[in-house]
Amino acid sequence: MDQATPPGKTLYGLSARAVENQLFIALITYCLMVMLQLKAGYRGPLLTIKRLIHTCLYEPFTFFVQALHRKPQHSTRGRRRVDYERIYQETVRRVLAGEAGYLHDVTYDPLVL
């Protein structure tokens, strides 16, 4: 497989029959996932079902359905915003106060104040 091509975007066979078979496999997979979504009574995205199939492959169907309907453990607030101005001001304050010895430490991370 070409390094520049993401996985899942490549046809493994190039003959007309091979391409046709791969399309049929993709359609059958999609239909099975939609049927599973209906059977489980889940209204969320199919990507969640795909991920849980990998996780719960050898578990009973009831375990899969419970995991599918489980509420998230944590909620995200989106992408973390970095206040670069505050980091700069704090660094300047520490340098002027003579507390800049940590800047020579290679493990220092200015984003963790």
Image (spheres, grey):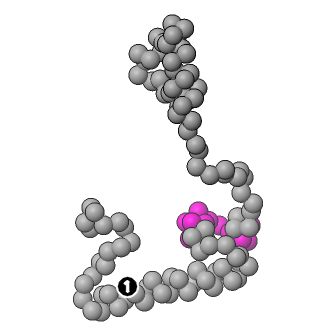
**Does residue 33 lie above or below 99 as drawn?**
below
* Image quadrant assignment for residue 49: bottom right
Q: Please state which of residues 90 and 38 is positioned toward the viewer in this rendering.
A: 90
Residue occupying the far top of the picture: 98
Percent across and percent down for residue 103 are: 44, 17
Percent across and percent down for residue 91 are: 51, 20
Q: Please state which of residues 82 and 11 is positioned toward the viewer in this rendering.
A: 82
Would you name the residue on which mark 1 appears?
22
Q: Indicate yes or no whether the magenta region holds residue 61.
A: yes
Q: Residue at x 46, y 11 (%)?
A: 101
Q: Is residue 98 visible from the viewing direction of this image?
A: yes
Bin the neighbour count of mark 1 within 10 Å (Cα to Cα): few under 14, some 14-19, many 20 and up.
some
Q: Is residue 57 visible from the viewing direction of this image?
A: no
Residue 113 vs residue 24: left or right? right
Percent across and percent down for residue 66 are: 74, 67
* Image quadrant assignment for residue 71: bottom right
Magenta stretch: dominant SS? Answer: helix
Q: Please state which of residues 7 and 32 is positioned toward the viewer in this rendering.
A: 7
Q: Residue at x 56, y 21 (%)?
A: 90
Residue type, label 1: Gln
Magenta range is 50-66
Residue 26 vs residue 68: left or right? left
**Does residue 39 lie above or below 78 as drawn?**
below
Q: Residue at x 27, y 92 (%)?
A: 16
Instruction: Kindly state the secondary structure of the residue where label 1 is placed.
Output: helix
**Which quadrant: the C terminus?**
top right
**Does residue 58 lie above or below 31 as drawn?**
above
